Image (tube, rainbow, N blue to C red):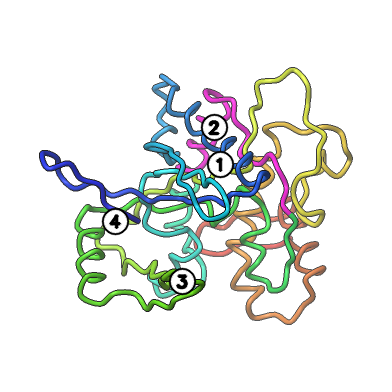
Amino acid sequence: MTCLRWPWKSIEYFAVKITNCSEGDRKSAQAEVNIFEHISKSESQHIGRRYVRVMKDSFTIQGPHGQHICLALEPMRQTLWTVPPYLGCTILPAPVFKPLLQLLLLGLDFLHSDCHIIHTGKYLKTHIHTPFNLLNCEDLKADNFMLVFEEDGVIDDYVKNLDKDPSPCEERDGRPIYASRPDFGPLRRGRGRLKISDFGRAVFGDKSLLYYHKIQPVQFSAPEVLLKAGWTYSADIWNMGMVVSTLTLVAFLSTSVISCEQIAMASLGACFTTRWNWSGSCRIL
């Protein structure tokens, strides 16, 4: 995160995403820039646009091995799956998760209906080693649901603390490498507001033909993807269901000794057989 300021303007913070400079990475980064720009140009008054992260600007920098495309993004607090410890629990309580889910669905509806964007459009092979990796196995995942800062003072205090106590640093290949310090502390008020982030794998859905290329790990693929029947916006809805399923199953998974294959099958089954009980748990019939 960095701070940009003209003398006559107040301080404004940005999160800068610096992408790799290989040909494939540059192509992917430019595609993400195009998606963000398309979202920004939308004149829709859809309430869901409030729950989609925006790109403020983009630029390139020259590195020792080539040019890097950089995205200046709206700064965000933290990812959804890191919130439970701040609330003193292992999973998000239903009274907290239910309204957040409604915000995410509004954001997804804005992307689908007004921007014609499918968030899940490309697949990068994922190796699942632990139950908690279930939260990160799709592109529309808990990692891409990020909390907005509840007040400006959170960032100001974070910057002041870094000035007093800088992050540990070590030198590699003649360059300083700083340890990441993403902890902004407990929420100061409210439950926070979520936004959908990261459009590196998104594709446009305003096409007459369906998509047939491979997306999602096999264990978590939507039925139309497994059957090679062609997919579109429905892939996002499936992934959202997987996120809901895995977020509510973490407490069970973390206390059970079962294989990754069993976890995958249980998660897929939950999408069809879970009946919600908003008192804080889900029941598998």
Mark 2 — residue?
Answer: 35
Q: What amino acid is found at the position of numbered circle 2 in the picture?
A: Ile
Q: Which mark is residue 199?
A: 1
Q: What amino acid is found at the position of numbered circle 3 in the picture?
A: Gly
Earlier residue among tags 3 and 4: 3
Viewer-side residue, 5 vs 98 = 5
User: Mark 1 Cα within 10 Å, few/some/many (few <14, many 20+)?
Assistant: many
Residue drawn 44% across and 45% down? 195
Earlier residue among tags 3 and 1: 3
Q: How many marks?
A: 4
Residue drawn 59% across and 43% down? 200
Residue 270 versus residue 71 in the image, above or below: below
Report whether 277 appears left or right of 82: right
Residue 54 in percent (x, y) is at 41, 38
Residue range highlighted in magenta = 103-124
Label 2 element class: helix
Label 3 element class: loop
Task: Find out whether the residues at labels 2 and 1 contact each other: C-beta distance under 8 Å.
Answer: yes
Q: What amino acid is found at the position of numbered circle 4 in the picture?
A: Gly
Mark 4 — residue?
Answer: 190
Q: What amino acid is found at the position of numbered circle 1 in the picture?
A: Phe
Residue 135 in percent (x, y) is at 62, 61
Q: Which mark is residue 174?
A: 3
Earlier residue among tags 4 and 1: 4
The residues tagged by marks 4 and 1 sit, at their Cα atoms, a distance apart of 27 Å
